[in-house]
Image (spheres, helix red, strand yellow):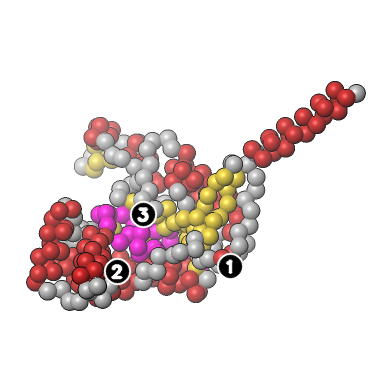
């Protein structure tokens, strides 16, 4: 009898451990804790973790990308007002403000019930669960996928396609996907794929592999392209951030240092301009102490 009781206790303990390992229904977060959340997984369970310190960048801080700002802000304003809006794919040169623009529109429209959920690429398979979690909420949610790219047959690739426009279930009206990528079609393109192309009359038709890659990016209703900055644009961005850091005007000496800084990094991007202004302001204030 004692052995039988001991066996039952061991079995119950085993069942409890197995239950902890099994995926559970996503727990409702504290919606008042933040306007931005990150999707996280622990012990097979997904949950929304509030972001305490949000990057407070504003739309006015983003220089040299006025057309791109106009497109994304207009789309977001439509979304928060409950009128039709599109999923957005922001692609192009690195450091030109793709991710910062998404953060800026969140800061601009958070007071109008806009919320952001950042989802890492490896967690895209959980997109249907995230959509179900927020479906009945009054807020408007942007699911943000930063620096997105896929290799062939990754599970997140198909999950994203389904949520964008491939499921029998209609997409909820309070969710959009904003994704950034350095690749227009989100997947690598190989020389050999050109051999699949066929000529039909005077037209060139891409092969099945290329069509499959294009099919994902085409599910985003709005494409926003970013381009490398000219030297003049780069220096304007430097001047803006110097003013932001209260580090004075951009003199000829500062201009030359800013250009040398960009040359050393092989890029005249907005990110490089911000890094230079931050470094210059820090050194200037250090000398003043």
Residue underneath mark 3: 180
Q: Is residue 221 left or right of residue 268?
A: right
**Mark 1 or mark 3: which is in front?**
1
Sequence-wise, the earlier of marks 1 and 3 is 1
Image x and y of residue 146, in percent: 39, 53
Say which element carries label 1: helix
Residue for badge 2: 62
Mark 2 or mark 3, which is nearer the start of the sequence? 2
In primary-sequence order, the first of circles 2 and 1 is 1
Q: Secondary structure at mark 2?
A: loop
Q: Is residue 51 visible?
A: yes
- What's the residue at 42%, 58% (across, down)? 178
| Residue 209 in which image quadrant | top left
Q: Which residues are magenta?
A: 80-103
Residue drawn 23% across the image and 63% down it: 279
Give the labeled residue for mark 1. 32
Instruction: Answer whether residue 86 is magenta in the image.
Output: yes
In percent of width and height, residue 241 lies at: 25, 70
């Amino acid at each position: 009898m004692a052995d039988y009781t001991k066996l039952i206790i061991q079995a119950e303990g085993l069942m409890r451990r197995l239950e902890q390992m099994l995926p559970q229904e996503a727990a409702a977060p504290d919606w008042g804790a933040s306007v931005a959340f990150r999707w996280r997984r622990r012990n097979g369970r997904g949950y929304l973790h509030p972001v305490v310190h949000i990057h407070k960048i504003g739309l006015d801080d983003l220089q040299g990308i006025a057309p791109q700002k106009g497109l994304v802000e207009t789309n977001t304003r439509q979304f928060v007002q409950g009128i039709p809006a599109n999923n957005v794919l922001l692609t192009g040169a690195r450091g030109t403000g793709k991710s910062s623009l998404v953060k800026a529109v969140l800061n601009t429209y958070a007071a109008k019930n806009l919320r952001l959920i950042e989802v890492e690429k490896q967690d895209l398979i959980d997109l249907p669960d995230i959509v179900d979690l927020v479906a009945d909420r009054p807020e408007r949610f942007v699911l943000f996928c930063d620096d997105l790219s896929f290799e062939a047959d990754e599970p997140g690739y198909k999950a994203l396609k389904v949520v964008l426009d491939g499921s029998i279930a209609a997409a909820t009206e309070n969710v959009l996907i904003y994704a950034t990528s350095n690749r227009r079609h989100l997947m690598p393109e190989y020389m050999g794929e050109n051999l699949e192309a066929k000529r039909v009359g005077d037209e060139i038709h891409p092969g099945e592999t290329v069509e499959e890659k294009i099919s994902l990016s085409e599910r985003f209703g709005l494409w926003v392209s970013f381009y490398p900055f000219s030297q003049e644009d780069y220096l304007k961005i430097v001047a803006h951030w110097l003013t932001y850091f209260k580090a004075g005007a951009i003199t000829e000496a500062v201009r030359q240092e800013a250009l040398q800084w960009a040359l050393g990094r092989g890029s005249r991007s907005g990110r490089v301009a911000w890094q230079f202004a931050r470094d210059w302001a820090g050194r200037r204030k250090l000398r003043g102490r």
